Image (cartoon, rainbow, N blue to C red):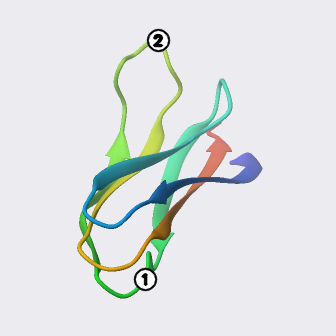
Amino acid sequence: MSGWEYVTASVSLPAGTTKSATARCSAGKQIFGGGFTSPGTGATVVESHPIFTPTTLPPAWIVWARNSGADSTLSVYALCATAS
């Protein structure tokens, strides 16, 4: 493996909403892991996993969160590299 990268993405997570954030690898790289930072009090992460579709896009890590508390931010990260 070579060319490691740490990719991040964030979205606002207003009170009373459910949203997703996706961190996508660069073209030609594969995903080797990922996760999220705590979206705050009152927010619950309901999904956190890699995605490989559509096949025309590089793989990514997606996180869905539901917020029943105060406005917050959902942040996700992906660990990517070139597999040789």
How many angstroms separate mark 2 from mark 1 (CA)?
Answer: 34 Å
> Identity of the amino acid at label 2?
Thr
Taking the view exactly as shown, the residue that stands out farthest to the right is 3
Q: Residue furthest top?
A: 56
Which numbered circle lies on residue 40?
Answer: 1
| Mark 1 neighbour density, 10 Å: few (under 14) some (14–19) many (20 or more) | some
Q: Residue at x 37, y 47 (%)?
A: 50
Q: Which element carries disc 2, helix, strand or loop?
A: loop
Left or right: where does residue 36 sit relative to residue 27? left
44 relative to 41 in the view: left or right: left
Disc on res. 84: none
User: Percent position (x, y) of residue 56?
Assistant: 47, 11
Residue placed farthest to the bottom in the image?
A: 41
User: Where 29 sits versus 69, above or below?
Assistant: above
**The C terminus lies in which quarter of the figure?**
top right
Q: Is residue 71 above or below residue 38?
A: above
Q: Is residue 73 found left or right of 2 in the rendered image?
A: left
In the picture of the structure, the residue carrying the numbered disc 2 is 56
Residue at x-position 48% and y-position 40%: 60
The location of residue 78, given as percent across then percent down, is: 56, 54
* Amino acid type shown at disc 1: Gly
Q: What x and y, as percent, mark residue 36? A: 47, 69
- Label 2 or label 1, whichever lies nearer to me, is 1
Give 61 or 5, whichever is nearer the viewer. 61
